[in-house]
Amino acid sequence: MSNSSSLNEFLLLAFADTRELQLLHFLLFLGIYLAALLGNGLIITAVAGNHHLHTPMYFFLLNLSILDVGSISTTVPKSMANSLWDTRAISYSGCAAQVFFFVFFMSAEYFLLTIMAYDRYNAICRPLHYGTLMGSRACVKMATAAWASGFLNALLHTANTFSIPLCQGNTVDQFFCEIPQILKLSCSDSYLRELGVIVVSTCLAFACFVFIVVSYVQIFTAVLRIPSEQGRHKAFSTCLPHLAVVSLFVSTGIFAYLKPPSISSPAPDLVVAVLYSVVPPAVNPLIYSMRNKELKEALRKLIQLVLLQQQ
């Protein structure tokens, strides 16, 4: 295969070879996908429909849920369809679209998590200025910046990746089109331009990570100074879900892209990809709803309303 212009499709990595295991994979991913849609859908509806939750924290949570639905919808349905119909193929344009939307949603989510850390910092460390710093207009601007940054990042990576000549076949060693796996198909030294873009993105991601860490160091310092135990518990309850989501997002992403080459093989790479691309969107709604009384109450009322309408 001389270059990428002759490619019509890519072949994705299959989870299993036997028909029974393919159907098991389909059912497992279907369950996870439906759980992610249900959990994030409930949060989006609850926040949008309850005026008590029209605050900066829940506004950003609504955006996070939308991004989670987008990211899991980019990868899982195609993988389920391939298992159901016993195929591995994805079109060239479909692969490019998958790369773009996956990078877009994941980048925007990471930027949004950074903004959410800033929101928690202002709420706990600068409560007197919180209303001014986190007004509705400021929140919309920050959320728009996260979405726009994700879009530009995805556009840059997709354009660079798919302008590189591909000479190593069309088999992608992953269950979805992932940039590192596509770069393995490139001609020698032709991937250096995209590698430079990845280095810049990594530096930006590291800067966001440092900002989150510094914010939480100051948050925990401020919380520990609160004299009442009830006050400390309330402050922690608004921070721990976000911290748990950040930890899950960052740890799985770091392990996926910075693991030693010695443990890089199709089977472990497949498992790690599931951990960072499929599990967080399904688990995030559970993390946020477990320790948040206001959100749990809003979800309870929403479910009761739906059940009453069905009767």
Image: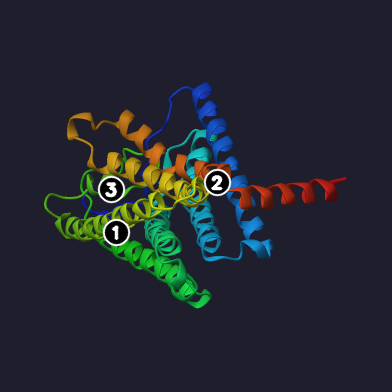
Q: Position of residue 1 (x, y in %)?
A: 23, 47
Q: Assess disc 2: are there few (<14), some (14-19) or many (≥20) residues with their C-alpha within 10 Å of its C-alpha.
A: many
Any mark on residue 211, and which? 1
- Can the viewer see residue 169 in this picture? no
Q: In which quarter of the image is residue 181?
A: top left
Q: Which residue lies furthest to the front in this view?
A: 227
Separation (CA) of disc 1 from disc 2: 24 Å
Q: Which amino acid, by three-letter code, is at mark 2?
A: Pro
Q: Which of marks 1 and 3 is nearer the N terminus?
A: 3
Residue 261 vertical position relative to residue 170 in the rendered view, above or below: above
Dot 3 and dot 2 residues touching (CB under 8 Å): no
Q: Nearer the viewer, residue 222 or 299?
A: 222
Q: Assess disc 3: are there few (<14), some (14-19) or many (≥20) residues with their C-alpha within 10 Å of its C-alpha.
A: many
- Can the viewer see residue 52 in this picture? yes
Separation (CA) of disc 1 from disc 3: 31 Å
Residue 50 vertical position relative to residue 88 in the rendered view, above or below: below
- Say what secondary structure mark 3 lies in: helix
Residue indicated by mark 3 = 182
Q: Which of marks 1 and 2 is in front?
A: 1
